[in-house]
Amino acid sequence: MSQEKCLFCRIASGELPSKKVYEDEEFVAFHDIRPAAPLHVLLIPRKHIASLSDLKPDDAPLLGRMMMTVGKLAEQLGVAYTGGETGFRTVFNTGPGGGQEVYHLHAHILAGPGPWSRMG
Ligand code: AMP
Ligand code: ZN
Protein backbone atom coordinates (compact mmCIF):
# COMPACT_ATOMS: atom_id res chain seq x y z
CA MET A 1 0.00 0.00 0.00
CA SER A 2 1.58 3.29 -1.09
CA GLN A 3 1.32 6.23 1.25
CA GLU A 4 -0.56 8.26 -1.41
CA LYS A 5 -3.36 5.68 -1.37
CA CYS A 6 -3.28 5.00 2.39
CA LEU A 7 -6.66 5.80 3.96
CA PHE A 8 -5.26 7.11 7.24
CA CYS A 9 -2.51 9.17 5.54
CA ARG A 10 -5.32 10.84 3.58
CA ILE A 11 -7.33 11.43 6.75
CA ALA A 12 -4.23 12.85 8.51
CA SER A 13 -3.60 15.29 5.66
CA GLY A 14 -7.26 16.36 5.56
CA GLU A 15 -7.72 15.01 2.02
CA LEU A 16 -10.47 12.74 3.39
CA PRO A 17 -12.98 13.90 6.03
CA SER A 18 -13.06 12.60 9.60
CA LYS A 19 -14.55 13.61 12.93
CA LYS A 20 -11.32 14.83 14.48
CA VAL A 21 -11.05 15.13 18.24
CA TYR A 22 -7.34 16.01 18.46
CA GLU A 23 -4.39 16.93 16.28
CA ASP A 24 -0.87 18.22 16.72
CA GLU A 25 2.21 18.27 14.50
CA GLU A 26 2.80 14.55 14.98
CA PHE A 27 -0.57 12.84 15.69
CA VAL A 28 -4.25 12.96 14.71
CA ALA A 29 -7.21 11.40 16.55
CA PHE A 30 -10.71 10.94 15.13
CA HIS A 31 -13.89 8.96 15.76
CA ASP A 32 -13.99 5.44 14.33
CA ILE A 33 -16.55 5.32 11.51
CA ARG A 34 -17.91 1.98 12.84
CA PRO A 35 -17.75 2.41 16.62
CA ALA A 36 -17.48 -0.77 18.68
CA ALA A 37 -18.13 1.03 21.98
CA PRO A 38 -19.96 4.20 23.10
CA LEU A 39 -16.63 6.03 22.71
CA HIS A 40 -14.31 4.72 19.97
CA VAL A 41 -11.49 6.95 18.81
CA LEU A 42 -8.45 6.14 16.66
CA LEU A 43 -5.08 7.79 17.29
CA ILE A 44 -2.59 7.74 14.41
CA PRO A 45 0.86 9.16 13.81
CA ARG A 46 1.08 11.43 10.74
CA LYS A 47 4.12 9.37 9.75
CA HIS A 48 3.14 6.32 7.70
CA ILE A 49 4.08 3.19 9.65
CA ALA A 50 2.14 0.12 8.50
CA SER A 51 1.91 -1.74 11.82
CA LEU A 52 3.66 -2.57 15.08
CA SER A 53 5.55 -5.22 13.09
CA ASP A 54 7.05 -2.50 10.86
CA LEU A 55 8.61 -0.36 13.60
CA LYS A 56 12.24 0.67 13.25
CA PRO A 57 14.44 1.41 16.27
CA ASP A 58 14.27 5.12 15.30
CA ASP A 59 10.50 5.01 15.84
CA ALA A 60 10.85 4.38 19.60
CA PRO A 61 10.61 8.06 20.64
CA LEU A 62 7.54 8.54 18.42
CA LEU A 63 5.89 5.49 20.03
CA GLY A 64 6.64 6.87 23.47
CA ARG A 65 5.01 10.17 22.55
CA MET A 66 2.07 8.28 21.02
CA MET A 67 1.40 6.47 24.30
CA MET A 68 1.69 9.76 26.19
CA THR A 69 -0.88 11.17 23.75
CA VAL A 70 -3.25 8.24 24.46
CA GLY A 71 -3.23 9.23 28.13
CA LYS A 72 -3.70 12.92 27.34
CA LEU A 73 -6.51 12.18 24.89
CA ALA A 74 -8.33 9.93 27.38
CA GLU A 75 -8.23 12.78 29.85
CA GLN A 76 -9.53 15.24 27.23
CA LEU A 77 -12.33 12.82 26.30
CA GLY A 78 -13.30 12.37 29.94
CA VAL A 79 -12.48 8.65 30.15
CA ALA A 80 -9.13 8.60 31.99
CA TYR A 81 -8.77 6.30 34.97
CA THR A 82 -9.50 8.45 37.97
CA GLY A 83 -10.55 5.72 40.38
CA GLY A 84 -13.67 3.66 40.87
CA GLU A 85 -15.06 2.11 37.68
CA THR A 86 -13.50 4.66 35.29
CA GLY A 87 -10.97 3.91 32.53
CA PHE A 88 -10.60 2.89 28.91
CA ARG A 89 -9.15 0.19 26.65
CA THR A 90 -6.31 0.65 24.15
CA VAL A 91 -6.01 -1.87 21.28
CA PHE A 92 -3.45 -2.24 18.48
CA ASN A 93 -4.45 -4.87 15.89
CA THR A 94 -1.47 -6.19 13.94
CA GLY A 95 -1.72 -8.15 10.68
CA PRO A 96 -4.53 -10.44 9.55
CA GLY A 97 -3.87 -12.63 12.59
CA GLY A 98 -4.65 -9.65 14.81
CA GLY A 99 -7.64 -8.44 12.81
CA GLN A 100 -5.89 -5.40 11.28
CA GLU A 101 -7.87 -3.87 8.40
CA VAL A 102 -6.06 -0.56 7.83
CA TYR A 103 -2.28 -0.77 7.42
CA HIS A 104 -1.37 2.55 9.00
CA LEU A 105 -0.47 2.26 12.69
CA HIS A 106 -3.38 3.22 14.95
CA ALA A 107 -4.41 2.86 18.57
CA HIS A 108 -8.07 2.14 19.23
CA ILE A 109 -9.29 3.95 22.36
CA LEU A 110 -12.55 2.46 23.61
CA ALA A 111 -14.69 3.39 26.59
CA GLY A 112 -18.20 3.57 27.90
CA PRO A 113 -20.79 1.15 29.20
CA GLY A 114 -20.80 -2.32 27.62
CA PRO A 115 -21.53 -4.67 26.09
CA TRP A 116 -19.27 -3.63 23.20
CA SER A 117 -19.85 -5.02 19.73
CA ARG A 118 -16.18 -5.73 18.84
CA MET A 119 -12.90 -5.77 20.71
CA GLY A 120 -14.83 -6.20 23.94
P1 AMP B 1 -8.16 -2.21 12.39
O1 AMP B 1 -9.08 -3.37 12.17
O2 AMP B 1 -7.44 -2.26 13.71
O3 AMP B 1 -7.23 -1.99 11.22
O4 AMP B 1 -9.09 -0.95 12.53
C1 AMP B 1 -9.41 -0.10 11.49
C2 AMP B 1 -10.56 0.75 11.97
O5 AMP B 1 -10.69 1.83 11.09
C3 AMP B 1 -11.90 0.02 12.03
O6 AMP B 1 -12.41 0.04 13.36
C4 AMP B 1 -12.78 0.83 11.07
O7 AMP B 1 -14.10 0.98 11.53
C5 AMP B 1 -12.05 2.17 11.04
N1 AMP B 1 -12.23 2.96 9.82
C6 AMP B 1 -12.18 2.52 8.55
N2 AMP B 1 -12.35 3.55 7.69
C7 AMP B 1 -12.52 4.66 8.46
C8 AMP B 1 -12.76 6.05 8.17
N3 AMP B 1 -12.85 6.50 6.91
N4 AMP B 1 -12.90 6.89 9.21
C9 AMP B 1 -12.83 6.45 10.48
N5 AMP B 1 -12.59 5.17 10.82
C10 AMP B 1 -12.46 4.28 9.82
ZN1 ZN C 1 -0.57 5.83 5.94
Image (spheres, rainbow, N blue to C red):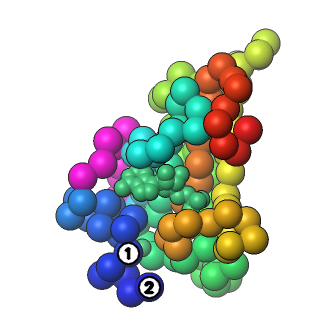
Within 8 Å: ligand 2 and the Cβ of disc 2? yes
| Amino acid type, callout 1 | Cys
Q: Position of residue 34 (x, y in %)?
A: 47, 44
Q: Which part of the image, by quadrant, shows the C terminus? A: top right
User: Which residue is pictured at 63% across the width and 82% down the height?
Assistant: 54
- Residue in the image at 48% along x and 59% along y: 44
Give amino acid for label 2. Answer: Met
Residue that badge 1 annotates: 6
Out of 105 and 101, give the one closest to the viewer.
101
Magenta segment includes 20: yes
Choose top left, top right, bottom left or bottom right for residue 96.
bottom right
Alpha carbon distance from label 1 to label 2: 6 Å
Q: Is residue 111 magenta?
A: no
Q: Is residue 12 visible?
A: yes
Q: Crowding at label 2, few (<14), some or many (≥20) Cα neighbours within 10 Å?
A: few
Q: Relative to 10, say whether 71 is above or below.
A: above
The residue sitting at 68% across, 51% down in the picture is: 91
107 left or right of 115 in image? left
Q: Residue beneath label 2, please?
A: 1
Q: Residue furthest front?
A: 117
Q: Position of residue 117 (x, y in %)?
A: 64, 36
Q: Is residue 71 visible?
A: no
